[in-house]
Image: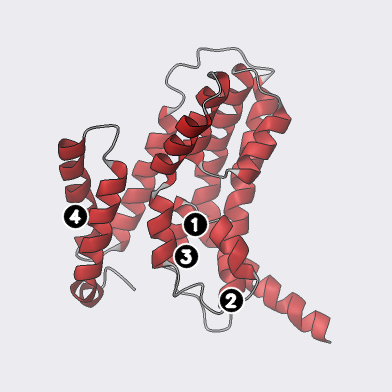
Amino acid sequence: MIATERANVLRNALRAAFPHTVPILAGFWFLGMAYGIYMNVSGFSVWYTLLMTILIFGGSLEFVAVSMLLSPFAPWSAFLMALMIQARHLFYGLSMLEKYKGLGAKRWYLIYGLCDETFSINCSAKVPAQVDRGWYYFFVTLLNQFYWVSGAVLGTLLGALLSFDMRGLEFVLTAMFVVIFLEQYLHEKQHITAIIGITATAACRLCFGESAFIVPAMLVILALLTLLRHPITKAGDWS
């Protein structure tokens, strides 16, 4: 009886989560396949792709990691590069503390699997009353990672069969971020957070330069969102 009830809880959470991840499925499969092909033409086997997508699970960092693996061994340089690229996840995590509170052991995987797309869905999710909140977040995270891993592995396998000019393939990552931004922008009513993000990023880009603006921009955005939390919530741009 208990097993049946648990199965129903999981089934309901999966059914509720899956429709919200369908746009990510389309994007991740295309982007993941592009990454897999990129890995193949760079000389890496499918096992490298599988391990990197599971263990790193950071699209932008994984693209950069290809060139780092092909470069002379420089652990500190690689560490700093990874920190700069993925530093935004520190702020994602801070903003998700309340949502992931009290979810038991599931929260460890939710923290590990938090990517841009999962953050976008879970942060603004309106979980149905009859659906377990923790399992809903869990399946959103799991499905998104599965899409990325399967797409990348498939791309690596297909890469061995294809032969074409790979220049510009990394641009699909930029396109993906644009789509995510537009999706979040359309979800908002007053677009306050979007304006803060664009303005702070542009200002820090001018002040700190191309190679060092990410962390300062994130700090400025975090500070502004904290200071303006009540006006943003009142405007309906933040739940």
Amino acid type of the residue tagged 1 in the rendering: Thr
Residue lying farthest to the bottom in this orientation:
1
In the rendered structure, the answer to whether residue 131 lies left or right of residue 224 reads: right
**10 Å neighbourhood of mark 3: few (<14), some, or many (≥20)?**
many
Amino acid type of the residue tagged 4 in the rendering: Ile
Amino acid type of the residue tagged 2 in the rendering: Leu
Label 3 residue SS: helix
Between the C-alphas of marks 4 and 3, the distance is 21 Å
**Residue 210 in the image: x percent, y percent?**
26, 32
**Residue at x 54% of width, y 61% of height:** 111
Label 2 residue SS: loop
- Total label count? 4
Judge whether 24 appears above or below 206 on screen. Answer: below
Residue pointed to by mark 3: 122
Between the C-alphas of marks 4 and 1, the distance is 22 Å
In the rendered structure, the answer to whether residue 77 lies left or right of residue 148 reads: left
* CB within 8 Å, label 2 to label 1: no
| Quadrant in which the C terminus is drawn | bottom left
Label 4 residue SS: helix
* CB within 8 Å, label 3 to label 2: no
Residue 103 badge: 2
Residue pointed to by mark 1: 118
**10 Å neighbourhood of mark 2: few (<14), some, or many (≥20)?**
some
- The reply to whether residue 50 is in sight is yes
Residue 195 badge: 4
* CB within 8 Å, label 1 to label 3: yes
Label 1 residue SS: helix
Query: Coloured how?
Result: secondary structure
Mark 3 or 2: in front is: 2
**10 Å neighbourhood of mark 4: few (<14), some, or many (≥20)?**
few
Between the C-alphas of marks 2 and 1, the distance is 17 Å
